[in-house]
Image (cartoon, rainbow, N blue to C red):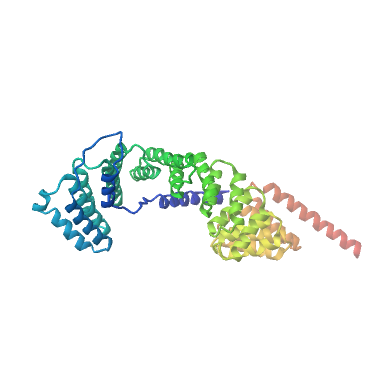
């Protein structure tokens, strides 16, 4: 099962790699923290807020008209013209004429113009100017602080983004699930995995409790964090949920791997079989792992079948070890005719003699004694044979079946120099002598 363990290690690496990709920070499109239309709505229909009462200055009509003009230009993608109006409004003279709420709206729209140009540094600076204004509506501050946090994350300033988001949480009585996920992703980036897990679990629970389906990336982040803690049971629970709502090849394979980590080999094989039947296994490493699992389950015929089909579909790598695996599987299944061509290819691609010796064993099982002797002899000459004594036993049996008793005797004597094969070699040598005597007696009776 050494090969199987290598396959499992590769799966572990690929599993972690897959989660890292799927856990990348994903932000929704950032909009101004408080649009002009929203500002008017706020004035027309103020909402009662139990947290804090603020007396917000009025947005005067002449200021509103200039802001509306700039916003119309921005919506038409005439960003330079929009910015010119805003710059004029916050020039030295213009700035003194604006109250804090009016300034906040100017900075807010300016921030958005910088954002659409992907000038995140300038956008962040303008949004911070919005927050800095006193007595702005609480809703405006809440929206802007969330945008500020997002902009820090866009610039990969993770800790600053986390700090900004925590301030947003302090102001918000009912944070939504997306906010908890954003915070979880921030903690993930600074490697505070326990905090990341707590927050993504909260987000998932919020959606599930409300009868909503959590996003796939939320489950993936939770799965990685469980995996990092070696909490394979919880990670497997997440994968089983993903298989129900987001069925993909990677989840079948990774769930199979986790069952392997939990020593549940039956379930491990069952998941791989399910993936195989759906045509998901299209990589050499996956098919090789599948074959090893079948061998471990003592069903070599299926192992050979998987490898055979993999070669025919040109999915399994054209390597000696893969042909050896296929040949060994067929040999264990007593499918000698199918084993031979696989072992022939394995031996031909190998630089050492071990595979020629193994091919000789298969030839011997198939009663192809001459080929068996030639193959073992070639293997011994090439070198790198793990048990030369056993190879010479096979060589001796091949010569014996060919009736070449002297060659057989020499092979058995050479094998007997190794104490591990001494007894067996002596038995064969005695058997050769008795067979020679039997044949002499037969000849006497004939003549």
Whether residue 175 sits left or right of residue 164 in the image: it is right
- Provide residue 265's location: percent of width, then percent of height: 60, 44
Instruction: Decide which of 309, 80 is in the foreground and name it.
Output: 80
Query: What residue is drawn where x is 60% and y is 56%?
Result: 276
Residue 396 lies, with reference to residue 192, above or below; the image says below
Instruction: Decide which of 207, 166 is in the foreground and name it.
Output: 207
- Provide residue 334's location: percent of width, then percent of height: 71, 56
Total numbered labels placed on residues in the image? 0
Whether residue 109 sits left or right of residue 218 in the image: it is left
Instruction: Decide which of 130, 102 is in the foreground and name it.
Output: 102
In which image quadrant can residue 314 be found? bottom right
Whether residue 308 sits left or right of residue 319 in the image: it is right
- Provide residue 49's location: percent of width, then percent of height: 30, 36
Instruction: Decide which of 313, 21 is in the foreground and name it.
Output: 21
Q: Can residue 129 be seen in this view?
A: no
Residue 230 lies, with reference to residue 111, above or below; the image says above
Quarter holding the C terminus is bottom right
In the orientation shown, which residue stands out farthest toward the left?
93
- Provide residue 112's location: percent of width, then percent of height: 25, 54
Q: Is residue 110 visible?
A: yes
Whether residue 63 sits left or right of residue 340 in the image: it is left
Query: What residue is drawn where x is 70% and y is 63%?
Result: 337
């Amino acid at each position: 099962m050494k090969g199987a363990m290598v396959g499992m290690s590769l799966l572990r690496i690929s599993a972690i790699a897959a989660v890292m990709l799927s856990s990348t920070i994903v932000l929704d499109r950032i909009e101004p923290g408080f649009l002009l239309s929203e500002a008017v709505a706020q004035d027309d229909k103020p909402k009662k807020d139990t947290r804090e009462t603020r007396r917000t200055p009025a947005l005067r009509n002449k200021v509103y008209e200039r802001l509306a003009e700039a916003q119309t230009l921005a919506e038409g993608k005439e960003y330079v013209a929009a910015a010119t109006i805003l710059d004029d409004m916050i020039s030295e003279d213009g700035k003194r004429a604006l109250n804090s709420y009016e300034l906040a709206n100017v900075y807010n729209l300016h921030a958005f113009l910088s954002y659409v140009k992907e000038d995140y540094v300038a956008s962040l600076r303008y949004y911070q100017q919005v927050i800095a204004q006193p007595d702005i509506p609480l809703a405006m501050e809440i929206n802007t602080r969330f945008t500020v946090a997002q902009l820090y994350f866009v610039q990969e300033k993770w800790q600053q983004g986390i700090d900004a988001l925590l301030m947003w949480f302090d102001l918000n009585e009912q944070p939504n699930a997306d906010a908890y996920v954003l915070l979880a992703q921030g903690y993930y980036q600074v490697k505070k995995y326990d905090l990341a897990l707590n927050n993504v679990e909260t987000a998932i629970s919020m959606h599930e409790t409300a009868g909503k389906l959590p996003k796939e990336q939320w489950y993936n982040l939770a799965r990685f964090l469980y995996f990092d803690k070696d909490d394979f049971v919880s990670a497997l629970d997440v994968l089983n949920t993903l298989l129900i709502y987001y069925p993909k090849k990677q989840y079948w394979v990774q769930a199979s791997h986790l069952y392997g980590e939990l020593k549940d080999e039956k379930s491990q094989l069952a998941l791989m079989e399910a993936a195989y039947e759906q045509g998901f296994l299209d990589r050499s490493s996956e098919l090789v792992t599948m074959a090893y699992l079948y061998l471990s389950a003592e069903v070599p015929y299926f192992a050979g079948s998987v490898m055979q089909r993999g070669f025919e579909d040109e999915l399994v790598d054209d390597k000696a070890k893969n042909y050896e695996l296929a040949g060994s599987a067929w040999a264990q299944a007593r499918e000698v005719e199918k084993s031979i061509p696989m072992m022939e290819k394995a031996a031909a691609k190998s630089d050492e003699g071990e595979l020629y010796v193994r091919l000789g064993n298969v030839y011997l099982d198939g009663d192809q004694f001459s080929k068996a002797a030639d193959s073992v002899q070639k293997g011994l000459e090439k070198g790198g044979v793990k048990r030369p004594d056993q190879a010479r036993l096979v060589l001796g049996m091949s010569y014996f079946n060919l009736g070449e008793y002297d060659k057989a005797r020499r092979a058995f004597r050479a094998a007997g120099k190794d104490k591990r094969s001494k007894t067996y070699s002596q038995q064969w040598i005695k058997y050769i002598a008795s067979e020679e005597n039997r044949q002499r007696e037969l000849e006497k009776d004939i003549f």
